[in-house]
Amino acid sequence: METQKQVTKKLQKATAEAIQQYTMIADGDKIMVCLSGGKDSYAMLHMLLHFKKVAPISFDIIAVNLDQKQPGFPEEVLPNYLTNLQVDYKIIEKNTYKIVMEKTPEGKTTCSLCSRLRRGTLYEAAKDLGCNKIALGHHRNDILETFFLNFFFAGKLETMPPKFKNDTGNLVVLRPLSFCRESDIEIYARFMNFPIIPCNLCGSQENLQRKRVKQMITDWEADFPNRSAIMMNALQNVFPSHLLDKNLYDFEHLESKISEASFVN
């Protein structure tokens, strides 16, 4: 059984690798840390608070939660927790729950619409708060699961990048936990005794494709240990010429390039 110190060090190391490899944080940044009340966003907040203390650069953090007015949402939990932690924070109140429930046909999942509404609201909040970056709590498992969801069900090679610009280009979105394993975050969350707030939307729905993909990866990992690490390496080791996307590789002029190279040699 790992100690709290051991799992904390593992998460700090993985987070540091992602921050350094993808140049996530620069001097003078103001980062909006999106806090949902789940284990992942709590862990991300604590990782960023750690690096705010020890990093050789100066950057600011503000924790932001979107209160979507879900029935039974414990409004006092996050303000109390963040006040005790002495973290700057803002709670945004917007009844996206009502919109999602009205617009989603019966039997369909709410995740897509909920995500779009939440994203737009948080982007606007970041602008109002003077933040130039937003941090989301997605981890390594989320990245792999998204890759396979797109591969099997959407017909595209795509996943969650560790760093990207929003569509308007005025915000950089970060995923500092990109290299962190969900199992490590779960252990860390138990040690830290985070006040977890369950989701009454996507978190309450069964038989989602993501859950099937998650189980598939879990089964692979049980039969072939370390598969997830190898798959994560694969996402960082891409050869466009060995895929089939002509928008990424100039197959049309391949023959002329080969002929020119042969002539020169």
Image: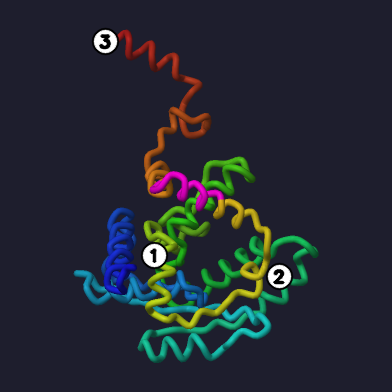
| Mark 3, residue position | 265
Q: Nearer the viewer, mark 1 or mark 3?
A: 1
Q: Residue furthest top?
A: 263
> Per the image, is 69 magenta?
no
Pointer 2 or 1: first along the chain: 2
Dot 1 lies on which element? helix
Q: Residues within 10 Å of mark 1 (few under 14, many from 20)?
A: some
Q: Where in the figure is residue 162, as x and y percent of width and height?
A: 41, 56
Which numbered disc covers residue 6? none
Dot 2 lies on which element? helix
Q: Where in the figure is residue 171, as x and y percent of width and height?
A: 44, 64
Which numbered disc covers residue 100? 2
Amino acid tagged 1: Asp
Q: Magenta segment range?
A: 216-226
Q: Residues within 10 Å of mark 2 (few under 14, many from 20)?
A: many
Badges 2 and 3: C-beta atoms under 8 Å apart? no
Q: Nearer the viewer, residue 46 or 265?
A: 46
Image: 245 above or below 88: above
| Mark 1, residue position | 184
Pointer 1 or 3: first along the chain: 1
